[in-house]
Amino acid sequence: MRKRVYIAHTGGTIGMTKAREGYRPARGNLQKQMKAMPELAHSSMPSYTVHDYDPLLDSSNMTPVEWVRIANDIADHYREYDGFAVLHGTDTMAYTASALPFMLQGLGKPVIITGSQIPLCEIRNDARENLITSLMLAANYDIPEVCLYFGGKLLRGCRSTKVSADGFAAFDSPNFPPLGTVGIDIEVNWDLVRRDKRRRKLQVHELAAPVVSALRLFPGISSDLVRNILRPPLQGLVLEAYGVGNGPDKNREFIEALAEATARGVVIVDCTQCLEGTVDLHEYATGSALARAGVVSGYDMTAEAALAKLFYLFSQGHSPARVKKEMQQDLRGEVTLTVHR
Ligand code: ASP
């Protein structure tokens, strides 16, 4: 019996057509292209159902509302299919790939998020390989995780980040090895694959609309700007700081703005602006000043994963103290807790 894969087509370049104003999504287009691909009808390929979302979105227009929609769509079709492929624009793919693992608790089947830099309708494209391999991974590999497959790499979703605006190797997970690599063979690093040992049933944690935000530090950042962003009703902030998590400790007003906010219960999570490596708030005075102001370490989490985790934890209705605690715990393989002081 052929395996069955459910394809949630949310939009993105992969299924776009060329219009006068540039590439844009068009309903039915992807299915038409796929029907014309003999390789998808091959007996080694799974059977599939494509669900075109309405509207199909350029992923720059995605919001947490769409994350919930995707999670519920997977849950609604969970029993009928062996695996799931989510076709998605690359621009915010890493955000969706970071949010879904928190929302899909007890996942026991593969969810492979993919897309492309060039649409399937173009002669030269990366869509064909990304699509075929993602379908194979979703159908035949027992990887019960939300993954991102792109350009030969199978990545843990909540570790992924977009690293190239125009290359075919557009995604990476710099702080975690790929779950798999695809060359002549599809090689899965099975030791890294997470399994829910409690064998829970799939449960969707929907997101409410907590007020969370992200702020990237830059030299000369004004304390007024920081104070403004930290105003109520803000509940959580991903602070993208320098190096191992440092910030301008000589700017007293900046530090005071952070301290006032954390005293009010705002959870501020420190992530590094660097692509690789971990936050250690105790390596420099410029980091420990942030820790004293109540900022917590995001360790080696990507900013995308930290933001998604804040959305998830606050949506659970947790207190700021509980959110703070769980931000520093590994919930879905999103963080390496190496620095303990
Ligand atoms: N703007 C597109 C999107 O994110 C880019 C892509 O899919 O590659 O939907």
Image (spheres, rainbow, N blue to C red):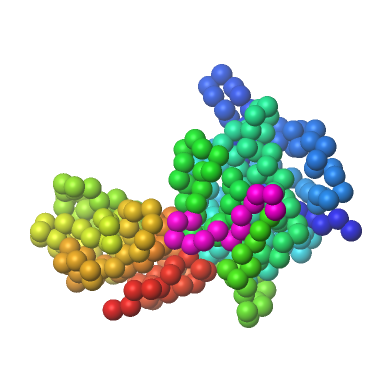
Location of residue 254 (image quadrant)? bottom left
* Quadrant including the C terminus: bottom left
Asked if one can make out residue 279 in the rendered structure from this viewpoint, the answer is yes
In the displayed structure, does residue 218 sit left or right of residue 82? left
Asked if one can make out residue 63 in the rendered structure from this viewpoint, the answer is no
**Residue at x 50%, y 51% (from the top left corner):** 172
Location of residue 239 (image quadrant)? bottom left
**Residue at x 59%, y 39% (from the top left corner):** 116
In the displayed structure, does residue 261 sit left or right of residue 336? left
Q: Is residue 160 above or below residue 41?
A: below
Residue 111: percent from left, percent from top: 65, 58
Q: Which residues are magenta?
A: 173-185
* Quadrant including the N terminus: bottom right
**Residue at x 38%, y 53% (from the top left corner):** 275
Query: Looking at the image, how many numbered discs can be counted on the residues?
Result: 0
User: What is the residue that sits farthest to the front in this orientation?
Assistant: 184
In the displayed structure, does residue 267 sit left or right of residue 161? left
Q: Magenta includes 178?
A: yes
User: What is the residue that sits farthest to the top in this orientation?
Assistant: 20
Q: Is residue 116 above or below residue 239?
A: above
Residue 295: percent from left, percent from top: 26, 67
